[in-house]
Image (cartoon, coloured by chain):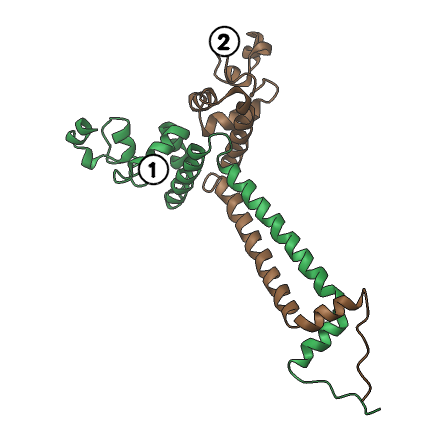
Chain colours: A brown, B green
Amino acid sequence: MHEEDQEGGGRRCAACKYLRRRCAHDCVLAPYFPASHPHRYASVHRVFGASNVARLLQSLPVDERAQAAETMAMEAQWRVEDPVYGCTGIISQLQEEIQATQCELARTRAQLAIVPAHGAQLQGSTVALPPPPPPP
Amino acid sequence: MHEEDQEGGGRRCAACKYLRRRCAHDCVLAPYFPASHPHRYASVHRVFGASNVARLLQSLPVDERAQAAETMAMEAQWRVEDPVYGCTGIISQLQEEIQATQCELARTRAQLAIVPAHGAQLQGSTVALPPPPPPP
């Protein structure tokens, strides 16, 4: 690393520094993987590889590349943290959360359904009381 | 493709067929990327690359490799379908669904909260009717 820093590393992006190569002025990775975030690129490199990332970014319009680089960095980080499940581990957690919330919603709706007409009257009574029953 | 098939492609896994190489008897990709699913491997190859996939599988215990290959195939497919967002597009959708369900739950709970004591009485009335009011 020390050796790399002496080779003008300050001007190289994280990817070119990682790959120990010169960083061309038109390097497609440079704007999205700055030298200041070497670990971010390291995960992306390990999971996707430099050539796949570069090819994907080049296939996109310039204004979409930052978002694509960001989502690849997130995806790579998830795969590094969980090599078996990666992002699908997050997706499973969210699906469980949806299911739990839907169950709770169904339970609450069922409670509300027990008092349909009366509930509606009582809700109305907070605004205007219903007329009193006729005298017997 | 026709040429590959003639080269004993039937015994090569999808990865080795894709890479036009011999499939070794201990090929780490063969059990998880069979020749019968060439498109599945093509997405994985395009997104992760053969060497990254092989390295990740080799780093895992054998009994976890099938699951890892499956999640990588899903992840790759999402990235092919949505090059900018990949799996994070799915994650955003699920997060929106959670938020919508939580809002609906909060709304339903608020409706139920308007009729707390009465609601409890009315719920009880489905089992046993309250005694009639005393005659005037």
Of B101 and A104, which appears nearest the observer?
B101
> Could you confirm whether marks 2 and 1 are on the same chain?
no
Number of numbered discs visible in the structure rendering: 2
Question: Please, what secondary structure does the residue beneath circle 2 have?
Answer: loop
How packed mark 1 is, by other alpha carbons closer than 10 Å (few <14, some 14-19, many 20 or more), is many
In this figure, which residue is indicated by the disc labeled 1? B40
Tag shown at residue A69: none
Which quarter shows the N terminus of chain B?
top left
Residue type, label 2: Arg
Which quarter shows the C terminus of chain B?
bottom right
Occupied quadrant, residue B105: bottom right
In this figure, which residue is indicated by the disc labeled 2? A22
Instruction: Please indicate, yes or no, whether residue B28 appears anywhere in the rendered image.
Output: no
Of B57 and A136, which appears nearest the observer?
A136
Cα gap from disc 2 to disc 1, whole angstroms: 35 Å
Q: Chain of mark 2?
A: A
